[in-house]
Amino acid sequence: MSSASPFRRSAPEFPSTSGVQRLQSLAVGSARFAGFWSAVVLPFAMLALVVSGSVAEQAPLFVGLLLANVVALRLGHGHRQE
C-alpha cells in the first residue's frame, strides 16, 4: 500500500526556458509591430486636426497624439530589422 497522498504534488512544473523565451519573443515582436504601425498612422490623425483647424480647440488631444507618436516611434524602432 502506498502512503503517497493524491492531494500532494511533487515539485511544481515551470515552463521550459525555451517556452518562456518564445513567449517573450512573441510579446516583444507584437509590441514592435504595434508600435511601428501606430507610428505610421498617428501622424495622419494629427494632420487631420491641423487641416481642420481644431488644434487650438483640442490642444490636449493634439499633445496626447504627439506623445503617443513619440512612444510608438521608440517602441516600433526595431520592427523587421534583420
Image: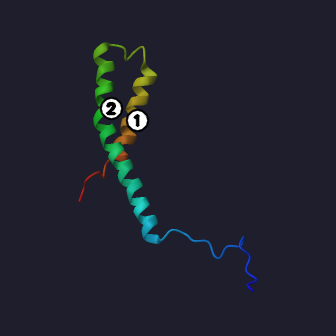
Circle 1: element type? helix
Viewer-nearest residue: 65 or 14: 14
Residue at the image point whose x is 40% and y is 15% from the top: 56
Relative vertical location of residue 71 with respect to residue 79 in this rendering, above or below: above
Q: Position of residue 60 (x, y in %)?
A: 46, 23
Within 10 Å of disc 2 (Cα), the crowding (few <14, some 14-19, many 20+) is some
Relative vertical location of residue 55 with respect to residue 6 in this rendering, above or below: above
Q: How is the image coloured?
A: rainbow
Please, what is the three-letter code of the amino acid marked with disc 1?
Answer: Ala
Earlier residue among tags 1 and 2: 2
User: In the image, 60: left or right of 35?
Assistant: right
Quarter assignment of residue 43:
top left
Q: Residue furthest front?
A: 1
User: Mark 1 sits on what residue?
Assistant: 68
Please, what is the three-letter code of the amino acid marked with disc 2?
Answer: Leu
Q: Residue furthest left?
A: 82
Residue at the image point whose x is 41% and y is 34% from the top: 67
Label 1 with label 2: CB-CB less than 8 Å: yes
User: Mark 2 sits on what residue?
Assistant: 42
Quarter assignment of residue 42:
top left
Which corner quadrant holds the N terminus?
bottom right
Viewer-nearest residue: 35 or 18: 18
Circle 2: element type? helix
